Structures are given as C-alpha cells and as structure tokens.
Amino acid sequence: MERGSKFYGYAIPVASEEEAQLFLAQLKKEHSKARHFCTGLRLFPDATLERFSDDGEPSGSAGRPILGQLIRHNLTNVFMVVVRYFGGTKLGISGLIEAYKNCATLTLFSATTIVRHVYAKVRLKLPYESFPQLINYCKQHEIPVLEESFDSRASILLGFKTSTYLTELLQALREHTSLDFTTIEAYATSLGWEIESEPGAIII
C-alpha cells in the first residue's frame, strides 16, 4: 500500500504475447474495480522483445519501472502485471515510479524462479551406421535431441548451452569419435559429417 492506493503484483512465465494478453484479461475480470493494470514483458532466449504499458498512468511512471525489474533480475519469458486500486491521493511521478518499482521487486522476491537454459541448435548429418552410437552418447550425457530425420543420411538436431556451446560440442565430438581435433571443421572433414549451426535458440 502507498498512501491509500493498493498495489497487487503478479509475475508468470509466458512463451508469447498472446499468453500474456490472456492472463491480463483474466486479471481484469478478477480485479474489476481496479483502475490501472500496468505491465512489463520480456520474451525470447535473448530477451529481444520487451514491452511495457503504463495503462493510463503518466508516461514512464509504471510500466518502465516494472520492466526495469525484469531486466535487473535477468529474467525473460516473464510477464509482470501490477494492479492498482486508487486510494484517493495522487502520488506524483516520483511516487508512482517508486510504488510500481517496489511492488515489482517484492513480487519477484516472493516468487519462485524457474531456471531454464538457452540452447544453440546444431545439425549433424552423418552415415546411418554412426547414428545409434551418437544417439546413445546424447542420452548418456543429457544432450537434448531436438529433431531426427532420415534421407540419404541420418540427420539429427542437437542442443548445446549457448554459454558453453563450442566447448560442449567439441567435447562431444572428441568423446564420441576418440579423435582429438581443435576445430569443428576438422572433425567434419575427418568423419565426412556435415556439422552446421542453425539460426535461433531454444529455451529448455
């Protein structure tokens, strides 16, 4: 509470703007007498989409402080809503910024953070005889298998944590093949495999 106004904070994991809007509509039904529903949203593994809304509050006094807390805590795929019931006393720009910031901070402190990892995608095309051994290796070392396909050669799409992508991929190739090269290109040439990074990333 701040000088009679009540602030309710909500933070939920979302994968799209559509999910965020559905949750906002639900909150508006639950808090039908509230005056403002101010929001902050960050999406995608690298947080390339950021949105905020002041929902009738003075520009920059509500949504930006909410989004700022998501950035400060290095969170993505999260939608935060601060619902305000007006208490009759105006807080002024600085008072609103502080109130929305504090509510967002307290909401995140009381929430449970879901930790997931961002994975780069790597496609390997290889002879069929090498495929079973590689699949077993991935299972043993908990390397996510994102896709499998079969044509003239076997094709497998793997995920490697972006923070250690090159190191993990080289280690996987080294252990799988018992060869010791320093580059991915050297492994591809020696094995006759195609090893290519694919654009985009995935959260698991």
Image (spheres, rainbow, N blue to C red):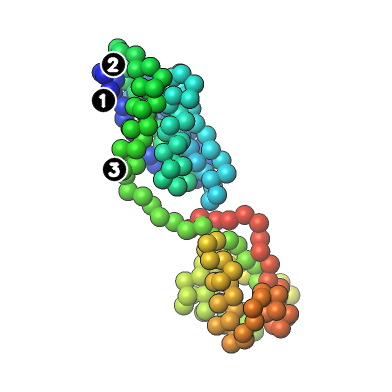
Residue extending farthest bottom: 178
Q: What residue type is labelled 3?
A: Ser
Residue 88: x and y in percent read 30, 12
Q: Do the residues labelled 3 and 1 touch (CB within 8 Å)?
A: no
Among the two numbered marks 3 and 1 on one chain, the one whose residue lies closer to the N terminus? 1
Query: Please, what secondary structure does the residue beneath circle 1 have?
Result: loop
Q: Can residue 38 be seen in this view?
A: yes
Dot 3, how many residues are within 10 Å of its Cα: few (below 14), some (14-19), or many (20+)?
A: few
For the point 56% across and 71% down, the residue is 167
Q: Which amino acid does label 1 sit on?
A: Met
Dot 2, how many residues are within 10 Å of its Cα: few (below 14), some (14-19), or many (20+)?
A: few
- Quadrant for residue 94, please give it: top left
Residue bearing mark 1? 1
Residue bearing mark 2? 87
| Mark 3 → mark 1, Cα distance in angstroms | 16 Å
Residue 86: x and y in percent read 32, 17
Residue bearing mark 3? 110
For the point 52% across and 79% down, the residue is 137
Dot 1, how many residues are within 10 Å of its Cα: few (below 14), some (14-19), or many (20+)?
A: few
Q: In this view, does 166 lie to the left or right of 6?
A: right
| Mark 3 → mark 2, Cα distance in angstroms | 24 Å
For the point 26% across and 25% down, the residue is 1
Query: Please, what secondary structure does the residue beneath circle 2 have?
Result: loop
Q: Is residue 99 above or below residue 192?
A: above
Query: Please, what secondary structure does the residue beneath circle 3 have?
Result: helix
Q: Is residue 5 above or below residue 194?
A: above
| Mark 1 → mark 2, Cα distance in angstroms | 9 Å
Q: Do the residues labelled 1 and 2 touch (CB within 8 Å)?
A: yes
Q: Is residue 124 above or below residue 201?
A: below
